[in-house]
Amino acid sequence: MHIGGGLFWALALAGASYEVGGTVAAFVWVGSAFVMWLFALVDMLGDPAPWRTTFRWWLGSFVAPVVLIAPAGRSSPTFTGSRRLR
């Protein structure tokens, strides 16, 4: 359910971002959301209750490029999920 919902939401993001900013905006937005989705998927696989991670990914997908760029200034970036990236 979480995987299918994520893919469906990515299609909705693609359409909305294309309408607002064209092909480049759609590519950047959906690409960023996809990278975030992969990190969230890793978090969800070991979690007995993945709804929190799903909800955080969904919220982050509205500002996906910012979410991926923001941790770049920190020494130990984290994703919206519970695990730290190293």
Image (cartoon, rainbow, N blue to C red):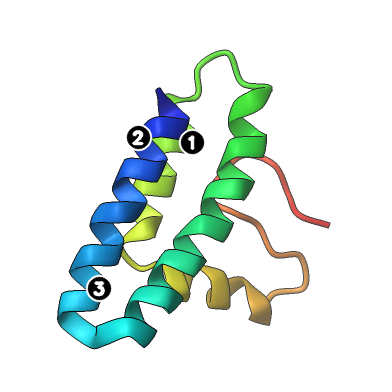
Callout 3, which amino acid? Ser
Q: Which mark is residue 18?
A: none
Residue 61, given in percent of the width and then of the height, sits at 37, 58
* Disc 1 residue crowd, few under 14, some 14–19, many 20+, Cα 10 Å: many
Q: Quadrant of residue 62?
A: bottom left
Among numbered discs 3 and 1, the one appearing first in the sequence: 3
Residue at position x 24%, y 54% in the image: 12
Residue at position x 63%, y 48% in the image: 39
The answer for how far apart the CA atoms under marks 2 and 1 are is 13 Å
> Which of 5/86 is in front?
5
Among numbered discs 2 and 3, the one appearing first in the sequence: 2
Among numbered discs 2 and 1, the one appearing first in the sequence: 2
Callout 2, which amino acid? Gly
> Which of 17/43 is in front?
17
The answer for how far apart the CA atoms under marks 2 and 3 are is 18 Å
Residues marked 2 and 1 touching at CB (< 8 Å): no
> Which of 45/85 is in front?
45
Residue annotated with mark 3: 17
* Disc 2 residue crowd, few under 14, some 14–19, many 20+, Cα 10 Å: few
Callout 1, which amino acid? Thr
The answer for how far apart the CA atoms under marks 3 and 1 are is 23 Å
Residue at position x 51%, y 57% in the image: 34
Observer-side mark, 2 or 1, equals 2
Tell me: 72 left or right of 61.
right
Q: Residue furthest right?
A: 86
Q: Residue furthest left?
A: 19
Identify the secondary structure beneath mark 2.
helix
Q: Which mark is residue 5?
A: 2
Relative vertical location of residue 65 with respect to residue 34 in this rendering, above or below: below
Identify the secondary structure beneath mark 1.
helix
